[in-house]
Image (cartoon, helix red, strand yellow):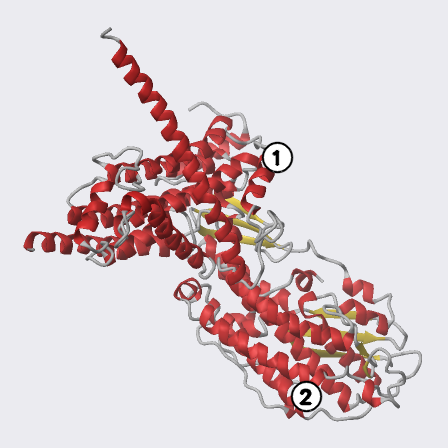
Amino acid sequence: MPDVMPVAIEINFYVLLVLKILVITGVMLGGLLPVILGELKIGAHMQSRVGPYYAGGRWGWAQPMADGLKFFQKEDLIPTAADRHVYKIAPYLLMVSTLALFVIIPFSPDLIAVDLDLGIFFALAISSLSTLGVLMAGWSSGNKYSLIGGLRAAAQIIAYELPLVLAVIGVVIQAGTLSMVGIVEAQVEMGVPFLIGGQVVGFVVFFIASLAELNRTPFDLPLAESELVMGYLTEYSGFRFAIFFLAEYAGIVAVSAIASTLFLGGYGFWGLDSAVFGPFVLAAKVGILAFLMIWIRWSWPRLREDQLQTLAWKWLIPISLVNIMATSIFKVVF
Amino acid sequence: MSQPLDPMAAAHVSEVAVSVELQTPGMTINIGPQHPSTHGVLRLVAELDGERIVNVEPVIGYMHRGYEKLSEVRTYPQINALVNRIDWVSGFSNEIPFMVAVERLMEIEVPERAQYIRLILTELVRISNHLVFLSSYPLELGASTPLMHALREREHVLELIEGVTGGRFHPNFNRIGGVKPAAGGGSTQKKLAQDLPKGFLAETRAAMDRVFGICDDLDTLVMGNEIFHARTKGVAIVPPDLALEYGVSGPNLRGSGVAFDLRKHENYLPYDKFDFDVAVGENGDCFDRYYVRHEEVRQAARIVNQAIDDIPTGPLQAKVPRVIKVPKGETYVRAENPKGEMGYYVVSDGGRIPYRLKIRSASFSNLSILPWALKGLLVPDIIALLGSLDFVLGDVDR
């Protein structure tokens, strides 16, 4: 029976694919809830408030889920002036592009959806897609505030994509590979994460640029409540708004995971077996970075559009170029 | 080209023909009257070129309540409750110039203790008003945490005001010839001990310590922040001569570098007995206007501390007739309110109600600088300037 084997492989392939999709979506959602709750509770305590208190019985731990349910109950309004199809698709596009980032994140040497040879390259390419979602949302809402918000987001992401990529190039040069697992293994081999082992500047640039990519404070100009009401989200309601909301936090988790992999040694930690403890080590590192983002959000005001562009073009890009040069010289000489 | 029939279309075509360069039409955006940061119902019709403001037209009047006309059908004591509501963030301060104007027309000498209580409450209201400004301004620039911290401390100040007057925002505490006796105090002439609540002075001192504390916090949290500097320094500069021309007053005028404070120039309350400095800005930008108010909170707390140290004993009320009739005449009394110069022009024809009451409110004149100051700025600067002027729409429209 020569035909059985290929069919079995094919079935296996699809079963595995579905499994992978389910696991990634589950991991993503599971990882989101603590981050959302952290944003609520940490923000509250920084402002000498209590924050969510009742939902779930203790510390308001069920508040993110309660919020989600609330959003799904609400009416899904579409403005008359909106471009209906674009308006409807925009949140999903944003969500899918953010979810796709989880595909290449290694949780342990073997626990990775797809270990692409071009891993980090894929991540950078996919993350740019989220701009399209935001731009579509802003454009299709038929609202001037939304439009300004969407265009701001586009300008911002174009400006900050460059330092983001350039900061990653330093890591790639040092590791000698684009594969995410390869980058982590290079750090494990070296004994210290790249943050200590020569990529401090790269990490800082990457972190700032990723804040801008995520539209987080101090780069939350596309949302800028006090100016643009709610930016490109102004007209969205109900579950479409919830998807935007989820995508924002999924972005935080994804970017933190990528940053941990690139600069903080990913799943590796001194003295811990990566195969067993890998996912927990990575989760802890993601938690630290997410806390940093939350901390910044509740402490700082936001920049102005021109200052944001100045920061990107006059500071971050030259600095990351110098970083690349220094890394290459270091790599060649030693 | 064929002759267009529609005159609108003709205008459109001629415009296209005239523009030689590649020009995109500007966008007109309507900010307000319902908008997160217009402080109520201010409406701005802004013409934008990208994010740059070409022209802006403020539209006011959504909050007009006709207080000047209402005053013409109310007795003088009744008007006191009305003027409270002009600028609701600093309600008590609004009563003072009106009371002083009436007392001057009636030639009543207000007892010293009543004057001190008025002064303490005025300064407490100034602290409360400025704390709202100092904390909500960073919020408009995107930082939400200072708001919570400053309002927490402001709560202590409001509690003091509530303890004395019974009201947090609209005390209606002044009476012609003095202040109201505290609840349960009976005849103020006899039971002097009951005019201020028990422990008021000690609590005030504790609250002032907290106020100094929050000032230090805001020093580092807001004024030490690099992004805050970038957003406010050199933004929306109002030169001193222009500020004077437009009648800008109060902290906004001092932010432009004019050291003019009515507390030093007028004698509506005994400010000459206290030692305090007038904070003055250098450049007239948003940062200076913030800095001036920040410093004023400290100075106000200093004044309060001095006043509770040497508050005299004595009656709270001068002798006034049962039915208040103001002799024929007219006067103008102005005072340094938290928002700026607040003045009442009272014209009396000798009866129980004023013939005419003209209210000069600070926010109206401060806001008049808007179309001039906003030209050429970016959209986020609208918010930076609006916030830094610290106006209340009730004070603009009256």
User: Label 2 belongs to which residue?
Assistant: B308
User: Label 1 belongs to which residue?
Assistant: A73
Mark 2, Cα crowd under 10 Å, few <14 / some 14-19 / many 20+, is some
Quarter of the image holding residue B125? bottom right
Left or right relative to A92: residue B175: right
- Per the image, label 2 sits on a secondary structure element best described as helix
Left or right relative to A196: residue B25: right
- Please identify the quadrant where the N terminus of chain B is shown: top left
Q: Is residue B356 above or below residue A166?
A: below
Instruction: Using the numbered discs, state the Cα–Cα distance from disc 1 to disc 2 in whole angstroms.
Output: 57 Å
- Name the residue located 63 percent from the left edge and 79 percent from the top edge: B207
- Per the image, label 1 sits on a secondary structure element best described as helix
- What x and y, as percent, mark residue A101? 34, 38
Q: Is residue B105 above or below residue A303?
A: below
- What x and y, as percent, mark residue B219? 47, 73
- Please identify the quadrant where the C terminus of chain B is shown: bottom right
Which chain contains the residue that carries disc 1?
Answer: A
